[in-house]
């Protein structure tokens, strides 16, 4: 069962990754971190017991479980079974405290459901990944159009409304978080809401699908124009979390960078079109299997240019992994990051392994090297951690990746999976000074 939140062992650990092994075998992908947290929060919209399956064993699920408990829910997270069972009271509490929200930015996803269910939501301004400013203006502007009064006081967003009403909202940018907040607010609002320029990531489709099975009326799912007709009440359901396309994409790069062959099971290649196409351009072969796909590579990768964009564009959450790939590729690649300005911080760490990367604003120029050399490096966020582990797999000698807690936030059972595929990797406590 779920270990206590206070005793999580990630702090002060290091991953030692031995370079030079070709990865080969099969790996299973769990449910998506970026979906399950929102599905858990959507459970707040219906009184009673909601069950979520295909739940990954990651720290963020424990944090979200604790947040929901503080809101008055009974939450049972069965790590082995991969389920979270959430029993929501008739009237949840409406305050999400700073001590949890600062540990996980995704906590902001309780804002919409709490406002709809309680008429008030006090949510601490989030912290989370160290990858840029990440505003909330689109969330706030949309809620205000739906009749909410929103103020920022003493580090908390305080939103109130007697009854939200439908509105026409046009997002300046197809923000994943803002689309989720507004959909969850609109499903119980009075009347019709339209969201134009909505995000259409597979995780948005997943939450909309769950909401529809709870009794919501949503049209245009999977497109950038959503129409939501508010209903009086929703009912609890059982829902299976969509596979984690970013974890699947990370394994795909692992196959390509180590010139190996990995079958990625329980994954949907349709959610990774551009990323897999880039791997094919780099020289990999990609084959669909019944419930996933196989990526194989038998030569040095060719450099590939990347431009990150909202779905269906190339995902920013795979950008560090592809920079690692380009670091050992044949040729030079230009990577453009359009979503999170601070994501290139990871490049400084990659340079410690001998990578030749220059950044200028939101562009990075990577000149591929024949090889990298192992060194101690620090993961600064989840995906930076993944990029460094991938680079460590091909760097000569041993790469020590610190900041393992970041990696644990997104990759369940990473060490076991890597070992099964043939990698030399171990995880241990750092020695105290
Ligand atoms: C989610 C994902 C994250 C992924 C990102 C983009 C979760 C928990 N995280 O983050 O892994 O990298 O989508 O695919 O699901 N913005 C504003 N104002 C707003 C909202 C967003 O300016 O009100 C900006 C952000 O600063 C950022 C960009 O929009 O530059 C993208 O943000 P958004 O799509 O909202 O990402 P998240 O939901 O934070």
Image (tube, grey):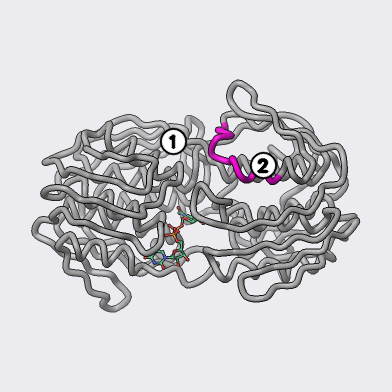
Q: Is residue 81 above or below residue 57?
A: above
Quarter of the picture holding the C terminus: bottom right
| Residue 268 sits inside the magenta stretch | yes
Task: Name the front one of labels 1 and 2.
Answer: 2
Left or right: 232 as drawn, with respect to 68: left
Q: What is the CA distance from the residue labelled 1 to the residue labelled 2?
A: 25 Å
The residue to which callout 1 is attached is 241
Residue 250: x and y, percent?
Answer: 65, 45
Mark 2 falls on what kind of element? helix
Query: Residue at point 32% right, 40% down?
Result: 220
Query: Residue at point 84% right, 39% down?
Result: 22
Q: Nearer the viewer, residue 79 or 280?
A: 280
Farthest residue to the left: give it: 162
Farthest residue to the bottom: give it: 154
**Residue 181, quarter of the rendered image:** bottom left
The residue to which callout 2 is attached is 277
Left or right: 16 as drawn, with respect to 380: right
Q: Nearer the viewer, residue 58 or 355?
A: 355
Rendered-image quarter of ligand 1: bottom left
Residue 92: x and y, percent?
Answer: 20, 51
Going from N to C along the chain, the mark reached first, 1 or 2, is 1
Q: Which residues are magenta?
A: 267-278
């Amino acid at each position: 069962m779920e270990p206590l939140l206070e005793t999580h062992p990630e702090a002060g650990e290091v991953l030692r990754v031995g370079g030079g092994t070709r990865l080969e075998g099969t790996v299973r992908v769990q449910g998506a971190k970026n979906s399950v947290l929102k599905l858990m929060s959507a459970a707040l919209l219906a009184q009673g017991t909601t069950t979520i399956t295909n739940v990954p064993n990651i720290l963020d699920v424990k944090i979200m479980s604790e947040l929901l408990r503080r809101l008055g829910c009974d939450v049972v997270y069965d790590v082995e079974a991969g389920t979270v069972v959430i029993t929501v009271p008739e009237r949840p509490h409406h305050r999400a405290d700073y001590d949890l929200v600062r540990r996980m930015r995704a906590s902001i996803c309780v804002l919409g459901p709490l406002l709809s269910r309680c008429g008030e939501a006090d949510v601490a301004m989030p912290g989370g990944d160290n990858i840029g400013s990440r505003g909330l203006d689109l969330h706030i502007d949309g809620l205000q159009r739906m009749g909410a009064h929103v103020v920022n006081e003493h580090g908390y967003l305080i939103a109130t409304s007697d009854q939200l009403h439908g509105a026409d909202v046009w997002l300046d940018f197809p923000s994943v978080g803002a689309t989720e907040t507004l959909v969850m607010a609109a499903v119980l609002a009075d009347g019709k809401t339209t969201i134009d320029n909505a995000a259409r990531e597979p995780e948005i489709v997943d939450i909309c699908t769950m909401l529809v099975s709870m009794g919501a009326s949503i049209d245009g799912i999977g497109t950038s124009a959503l129409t939501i007709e508010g209903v009086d009440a929703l009912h609890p359901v059982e829902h299976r979390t969509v596979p984690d396309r970013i974890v699947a994409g990370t394994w795909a790069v692992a196959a390509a960078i180590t010139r190996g062959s990995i079958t990625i099971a329980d994954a949907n290649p349709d959610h990774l079109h551009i990323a897999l196409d880039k791997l094919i351009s780099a020289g990999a072969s990609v084959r669909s299997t019944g419930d996933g796909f196989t990526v194989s590579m038998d030569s040095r990768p060719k450099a590939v240019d990347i431009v990150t964009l909202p779905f269906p564009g190339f995902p920013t959450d795979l950008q560090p992994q592809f920079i690692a790939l380009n670091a050992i590729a044949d040729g030079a690649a230009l990577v453009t990051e359009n979503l999170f300005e601070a994501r290139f911080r990871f490049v400084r760490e990659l340079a410690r392994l001998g990578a030749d990367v220059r950044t200028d604003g939101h562009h990075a120029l990577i000149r591929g090297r024949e090889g990298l050399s192992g060194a101690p490096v620090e993961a600064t966020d989840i995906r930076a951690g993944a990029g460094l582990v991938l680079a460590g797999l091909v760097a000569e000698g041993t790469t020590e990746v610190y900041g393992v807690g970041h990696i644990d936030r997104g990759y369940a059972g990473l060490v076991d999976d890597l070992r099964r595929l043939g990698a030399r990797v171990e995880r241990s406590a750092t020695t105290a000074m």
